[in-house]
Image: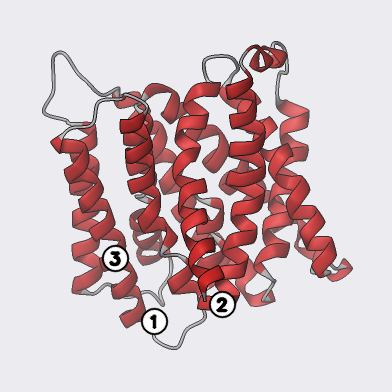
């Protein structure tokens, strides 16, 4: 049990620190280049573990089309490109808090597109609290002298909303195959790497080497730890605790992101603190609400949050 708690805390730390690493790297290379380096560094440990566990099989080739859709939408665009673009324009703590809205947009997408999903009061309250938390970060009342870049907020929200829609795609097209989460993540990440190798302009990518902190942040922090190792930890927690408890690491992520932002000298005030509390409360209410609405159902949603921070 002690190992389980350690894995839980480490997962929250790895996810929460990602935003600062992204912020550092954007000073030297583009968002797409950061995405490429991150996926490359994260894919290697995933592939090694997947091969060791023998979860990749020939029978999975008939799902390659669905894997490709998830690779482009839920991996290359969401987690890696849009999140980097948003983080480049925002304080890392604010970006981390907005990243916590994944659960809210996932709930909205499932209610809109899946007939089996039913809204209850707890879920409605969770969505409302989530939007209130987003509002405290976006500060729509600031017309002149804005302190938060609204484009950064929109990039972050586009990422989390796209991820919510991708959850529906998984439920509709991949859930019936009952694939191991590790296999799905490896296919997604590997195909996303292929797409990025073909599309990314690597001109100037060596500029990241000017700062070894930024280089280590992308390769080790974002890639090896924040992507590859984070998923392995999540996979372990799924086995030990189950999907609902394992996804509780998303509570830790906004707190870690805001704490690191404060330590790094970024401004953290009452609005940011209020926002993180609202987002955490939103996650809790949505999880409780969905448990009540789906008692006895199999939670393939556990696959998605592992790619989500």
In the picture as drawn, the residue positioned furthest to the right comes out as 58
Q: Which residue is mark 2?
A: 240
- Which of the labelled discs sits on residue 96, or is there none? none
Residue depth check, mark 1 versus mark 3: number of the one nearer the observer = 3
The structure residue drawn at horizontal position 21% and vertical position 51%, both measured from the top left corner, is 277
Residue depth check, mark 3 versus mark 2: number of the one nearer the observer = 2
**Dot 1: what SS?**
loop
Q: Answer above or below: position of 123 versus 83.
A: below
**Dot 3: what SS?**
helix
The structure residue drawn at horizontal position 34% and vertical position 69%, both measured from the top left corner, is 287
The structure residue drawn at horizontal position 33% and vertical position 47%, both measured from the top left corner, is 255
- Which of the labelled discs sits on residue 294, or is there none? 1
Q: Which residue is mark 3?
A: 284
Q: Are marks 3 and 2 in contact (CB under 8 Å)?
A: no
Residue 1 locus on image (x, y percent): 52, 76
Quadrant position of residue 46: bottom right
**Dot 2: what SS?**
helix
- Classify residue 242 as left or right of residue 48: left
The structure residue drawn at horizontal position 72% and vertical position 27%, both measured from the top left corner, is 199
Q: Are marks 1 and 2 in contact (CB under 8 Å)?
A: no
């Amino acid at each position: 049990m002690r190992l389980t708690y350690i894995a839980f805390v480490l997962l929250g730390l790895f996810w929460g620190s990602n935003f600062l690493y992204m912020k550092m790297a954007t000073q030297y290379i583009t968002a797409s280049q950061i995405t490429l380096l991150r996926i490359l560094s994260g894919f290697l440990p995933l592939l090694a573990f997947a091969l060791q566990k023998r979860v990749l099989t020939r029978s999975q080739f008939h799902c390659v089309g669905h894997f490709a859709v998830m690779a482009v939408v839920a991996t290359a665009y969401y987690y890696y490109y849009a999140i980097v673009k948003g983080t480049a324009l925002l304080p890392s703590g604010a970006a981390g808090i907005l990243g916590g809205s994944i659960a809210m947009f996932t709930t909205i997408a499932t209610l809109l597109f899946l007939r089996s999903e039913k809204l209850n009061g707890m879920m409605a309250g969770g969505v409302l609290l989530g939007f209130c938390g987003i509002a405290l970060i976006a500060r729509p009342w600031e017309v002149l002298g804005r302190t938060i870049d609204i484009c950064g907020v929109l990039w972050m929200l586009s990422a989390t909303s796209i991820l919510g829609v991708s959850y529906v795609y998984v439920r509709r097209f991949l859930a019936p195959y009952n694939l191991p989460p590790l296999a799905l993540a490896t296919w997604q990440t590997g195909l996303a790497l292929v797409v990025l190798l073909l599309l990314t302009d690597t001109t100037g990518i060596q500029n990241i080497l000017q700062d070894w902190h930024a280089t280590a942040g992308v390769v080790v922090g974002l890639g090896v730890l924040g992507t590859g190792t984070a998923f392995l930890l999540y996979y372990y927690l799924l086995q030990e605790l189950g999907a609902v408890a394992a996804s509780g690491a998303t509570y830790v992520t906004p707190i870690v992101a805001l704490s690191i932002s404060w330590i790094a000298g970024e401004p953290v005030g009452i609005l940011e603190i209020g926002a993180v509390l609202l987002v955490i409360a939103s996650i809790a209410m949505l999880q409780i609400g969905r448990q009540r609405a789906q008692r006895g159902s199999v939670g393939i949603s556990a696959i998605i949050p592992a790619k989500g921070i």
